[in-house]
Image (cartoon, grey):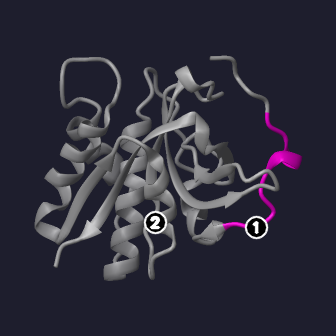
Amino acid sequence: MKKQKYTRKDWPTEWTGLNPRSMKAYRKYVNREFPGYCGTYTAAALTHYVIQQDREKELPMDDLIVGLKPLIDGRFWYKGTYPWDLIGGLRDLLDDAGYKPRWHLISNPIVTKELTQANPYPVIVGTTKAFGSKYGNHWLLVYAFGYNDSGQLFYKAYDNHGKINAVIPASQTMAAVWLERKD
């Protein structure tokens, strides 16, 4: 599929979800390794956010990245990270902490549903090269969504390349991974 070019004029003017300032702590966590470990970085940021919000505890991001890397990106022999790798790593880390990782093949309606709840958590979303994403196959942590004037859905995300305000069209994404509180 041909990459579609989007400019700021194509973006939504209003966003629903978390305040971008809530992602500021993650700006300095840039994935510079090859091959990339975007799954680990996004899972670490999601875990950090959730524990900080629910438990008011500060977990060191560096420790989360080191601890999650073998649970997610080194989980199986194949190259790349799939939703089940993220689910397995998050389950291994958070199962006893009262959180259940979930995934869905299509990011929308999960992102819109999760980010409109009271006290929402960000959602890990996979971009897809096959759908024309400039990121190729990559994991981002989505914290807001909006519709542009044409009704097209966009996400705002931490991209683990140093941006906390990355804007991506939902049409260039596939899977979503999120956490639910266990009752």
Which secondary structure is most common in the magenta stretch? Answer: loop
Q: Badge 1, how many Cα within 10 Å: few under 14, some, many 20+?
A: few
- Which residue is pictured at 20% across the width and 62% down the height? 100
Circle 1/circle 2 CB separation < 8 Å: no
Q: Residue 12 appears at what percent x and percent y?
A: 77, 57
Percent x, y of residue 91 = 17, 53
Residue 39 vs 16, above or below: the answer is above
Residue 81 position, x and y percent, is: 33, 30
Q: Amino acid at mark 2?
A: Lys
In the image as oriented, which residue stretches furthest toward the right? 9
Residue underneath mark 2: 113
Sooner in the amino-acid sequence: mark 1 or mark 2: 1
Q: Image height check: is 3 above or below 89?
A: above
Q: Nearer the viewer, residue 63 or 117?
A: 117
Quarter occupied by the C terminus = bottom left
Vertically, is 70 above or below 151? above
Q: Is residue 159 visible?
A: yes
Q: Can the viewer see residue 60?
A: no
Instruction: Provide the residue span drawn in magenta.
Output: 6-15
**Crowd band around label 2 with a 10 angstrom C-alpha radius: few (<14), some (14–19), many (20+):** few
Q: 164 and 17: which one is in front?
A: 17
Quarter of the image with the N terminus is top right
Q: Which residue is mark 1?
A: 14
Q: Nearer the viewer, residue 23 or 98?
A: 98
**Type of amino acid under label 1:** Glu
Quadrant of res 16: bottom right
Side (left or right) of 179 relative to 21: left
